[in-house]
Amino acid sequence: VDGLQVAIDGPSGSGKGTAAKMLAKEIGLPVLDTGLLYRLIGGLAIERAIALDESESLVALANEMLESVAWTVDGITFDGENWTDRLRSEAVGNAASKVASQPEVRECLLGLQRKIAESGCVMDGRDIGTVVLPGAQAKFFLTASVRERARRRWIQLKEQGGSSLEAVVEELKMRDQRDQERQHAPLLQAEDAIAIDSTTMRVDDVVDRMTGVLERRG
Ligand code: C5P
């Protein structure tokens, strides 16, 4: 699997993060959840009260982040501190999506993502198959109905004492729309990506489908 690049894209709650981790473990590759990079910038911007459309300050923040970010299969650290749990909230997800609509911010993260993938990687996000790793040997586009995706998010958020299912559906729709309609690197299925609708699938079956594709391709 040396040098193998697997791109997994899809909307929030499609199960791509869990599937990416499980697949990476199974085939013995590192994994990067690129959403965490955008979430970290969003989280830092909130903490420092930087407006989410102030592109110059956000680029400075992104560059600062690139200096002292590190990650493991369990998440992301900044300045030696583990930020993963703090970044899971819907507020940070929304901030991440706003920050991610700034092309200058995306540009900052492009080099890092490509460098990580050089020696082989499973990478999940929104634009991995289309922009970050257009030459990836395998590309998957994971979807699920908006209700099912909201239900999954809601169960996660409930553990932190979160909001109603209806509120999660509405927030998810808004974030989907922003991610799909932005000008730069919108959420889009790559032409050569294999679509998997996970609405009624267990994550194990999603991963089996992916390993099946990889095996057939040798
Ligand atoms: O996947 P996750 O929900 O953690 O991503 C948070 C936000 O970061 C998304 O709504 C999206 O706007 C942005 N993102 C992106 N490109 C990626 C990964 C995430 O624009 N490759």
Image (cartoon, rainbow, N blue to C red):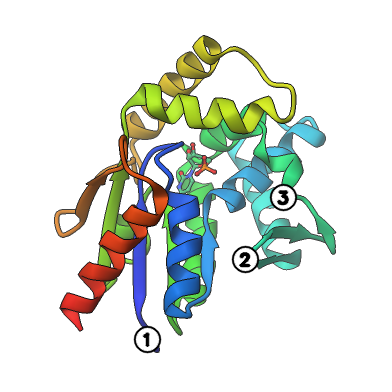
- Kind of element beneath mark 2: loop
The tag earlier along the polypeptide, 3 or 1, is 1
Q: Quadrant of residue 71?
A: bottom right
Q: Is residue 4 visible?
A: yes
Q: Report which residue position mark 2 lands on.
A: 73
90 relative position to 214: left or right: right
Q: Amino acid at mark 2?
A: Val
Q: Residues within 10 Å of mark 3 (few under 14, many from 20)?
A: some
Badge 1 amino acid: Val
Amino acid, disc 3: Thr
Residue, disc 3: 84
On whether ligand 1 comes within 8 Å of the CB at mark 2, the answer is no
Numbered circle sitting on residue 1: 1
Q: Compare residues 201 and 150 and report the one nearer the observer.
A: 201
For marks 3 and 2, the one nearer the N-term is 2
The x, y position of residue 69, in whole percent, is 71, 63
Residue sitting nearer the eye, 180 or 202: 202
Residue 217, position in %: x, y?
17, 78
